Amino acid sequence: MDEAGVVLLFRDKAYLHPEKVVELVRRAVPLALSPENDSRKEELKKLQEKKEEIDKLAHKQVRRILWSGLGFFMCQVGLFFRLTFWEFSWDVMEPIAFFTTASGLLVGYAYFLITSRDPTYEDFMERLYLSRHRKLCAKNSFDMAKYLELQKHCKCPLEGHYSHSSKFHDL
């Protein structure tokens, strides 16, 4: 009966429904070990392409925002320089410069209170990227949970686990 496929003998036990055992094993085995023509692999590939497009667009938007911030601060310095040496004197501009600097410190402290994270440029960039990424995923109807689930199933168990130290090294 074992050779006929009616009964499965495994570790001195007889299983009367070998098709159920096969189905349980198929669910436990990662998708990487499944046949090449599996529709989930194609779906994962499409989702990966869509995610890469969203990642690139999010990086591009973050870079645009960061360059705009640099432009703003350069204009502010230029304006203060012009007002200090041509229009007014240092006596007039000193309190303005002081309160501008104090306002920047207050904004940094408020950021720390709200987020419980250091107000560093790298942290700000990471939070900005994640915010842009979430908005783009929602706008493009990208299902991140489904993507992660397919990625987990398609990962080959023989591949080593690795993690990037930072997503933002190329920014």
Image: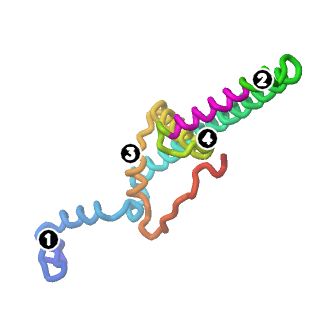
Query: Which quarter of the figure has residue 79?
Result: top right
The percent position of residue 113, horizontal first and vertical second, equals 48, 38
Within 10 angstroms of label 4, few (less than 14), some, or many (20 or more) residues?
Answer: many
Q: Which residue type does callout 1 highlight?
A: Val
User: Which is more N-terminal, label 2 or label 4?
Assistant: 4
**Which residue matches tag 4?**
59
**Which residue matches tag 3?**
145
Q: How much space separates mark 3 and mark 4, taking CA atoms?
A: 21 Å
Q: How much space separates mark 1 and mark 2, taking CA atoms?
A: 92 Å
| Residue furthest front as drawn | 91
Residue at the image point whose x is 33% and y is 65% from the top: 29
Residue 110 seen in this snapshot: yes
User: Which is more N-terminal, label 2 or label 1?
Assistant: 1
The percent position of residue 156, horizontal first and vertical second, equals 44, 64
Nearer to us: label 3 or label 1: 3
For numbered disc 1, what is the local secondary structure? loop
Q: Which residues are magenta?
A: 97-112
User: Which is more N-terminal, label 4 or label 1?
Assistant: 1
For numbered disc 3, what is the local secondary structure? helix
Q: How much space separates mark 3 and mark 1, taking CA atoms?
A: 39 Å
Q: How much space separates mark 3 and mark 2, taking CA atoms?
A: 54 Å
Residue at the image point whose x is 40% and y is 56% from the top: 152
The percent position of residue 30, horizontal first and vertical second, equals 36, 62
Report the magenta stretch's main SS. Answer: helix
**Which residue matches tag 1?**
6
User: Which is more N-terminal, label 2 or label 3?
Assistant: 2
